[in-house]
Amino acid sequence: MGKFGLSGNQRDFDAQLYLCETAFRVLPLDTFVRLSKSLVFPLYAVFHLCVLLVLMQSVLQNWRPPMYSTEDPATRNDAQNPPLPLGSAHPLLLQRPQLAYHAISAAVFGCLAVSTMRFKYLWTPHMCVLAAAGVADFEAWKILLNKLHAGLSESKVHLCRHIVTAGILALLFAVALPSTLDELKILKEFHDPDTVQLMEWIKKETPVSAAFTGSMQLMAGVKLSTGRPITNHPHYEDRDLRNRTKQLYQIYGRRHPQEVHAILKAHGTSYIIIENSICYERGHNIGCRLRDLMDMTNHHIVEGGTTGSEDHPATHARFCHAIQSGAPEYRKYFTMVFQNKTFRTYKVS
């Protein structure tokens, strides 16, 4: 609802935290280009459209009122003259409810994927299933050849579909093999020295019971790599955890250091980790940066963005930036204990 502007609060922190992510945006058009290069999308689109049309025709036939003979109704005996049978199911769907199920599911998942890119993982498997059925399904080939008045026997129909299937597989193999071989030549490895340095410092220099606060994605890494307690993590479905994360993210808002300190101590935080990539983020659009979301939550005027009816100028500097100044009002509550190009870690007094 929030994605299409139908919800009441368009500045809700939890909703915007999701909707601002790339995975929740509209499916990009280049997805169809990539799927077309592997012939998946064209085969899927043609076969899916045909199945939907046949399914609609069958449904309309089954919903049609029963047809009686032209005998005089006054003398007609329904027991002796039952209604004429409805139009029989199309051969493509006859005794094959699974095909109708996949067609309907693919249509639903396709709508979801086009509106929200993250649902692509639900649509793509159905797309592959229907594309494969369009290439190798015996009934589909039989109907197609009958429409062309080929009049082939079943063995020849089988031969035709096997030849076409083998040809398509050979074509895909020839197209995909060079790029696959090139990718196999590329040796990749994880290389993030700043994160490794941070994790090593945490393991060596902090108590085992020290609790850390930071971004959800970073806290997952801290927990996994160091085993230290964390105050928030990416399991965002829990309401209490969402409220806690919104409070702890005040380290990227424009709040007084005493207020931020009180929030952190209330949640048992020993150390905070500030990421420069979040504090000085330039990647997202204005209004989708984390600091912008915190400004909207606090009803502060967003830097360079739109202004809400309840927004007012912030009375304090942004915490993640101002804490670097080492001013007495910050040194009273926070002490820098670690720093590199990406992260700054402060001990909470």
Image: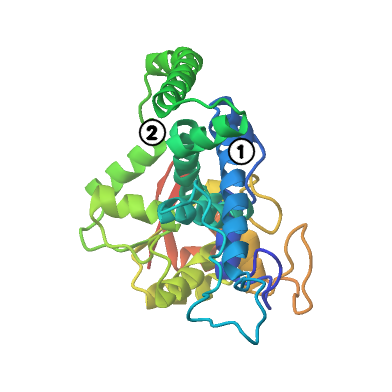
Q: Position of residue 244 (x, y in %)?
A: 44, 73
Say few, some or many: other residues with alpha carbon within 10 Å of mark 1 (under 14 / 14 to 19 / 20 or more). Answer: few
Q: Which kind of residue does numbered mark 1 sit on? A: Val
Q: Classify mark 1: helix, strand or loop.
A: helix
Q: Is 176 on the left-hand or right-hand side of 313?
A: left
The vertical placement of 312 against 283, above or below, is below
Q: Say if residue 225 shows up in the picture.
A: yes
Residue with the mark numbered 1 = 46
Task: Answer with mark 2 or mark 1, whichever residue precedes in sequence.
Answer: 1
| Closer to the camera in the image, 60 or 164 | 60
Which residue is pictured at 38% across the width and 30% down the height?
191
**Residue found 49% across the figure and 31% down from its top:** 135
Give the image location of residue 287, x and y in percent. Answer: 69, 59
Tell me the distance, in whole angstroms, between the alpha carbons under discs 2 and 1.
Answer: 49 Å
Residue closest to the eye, 298 or 37: 37
Where does the image place residue 223, in percent across and percent down from the top left?
A: 29, 55
Q: Is residue 167 above or below residue 135?
A: above
Residue at coordinates 53% horizontally, 70% vertically from top-left?
257
Q: Nearer the viewer, mark 2 or mark 1?
A: 1
For label 2, the residue is: 193
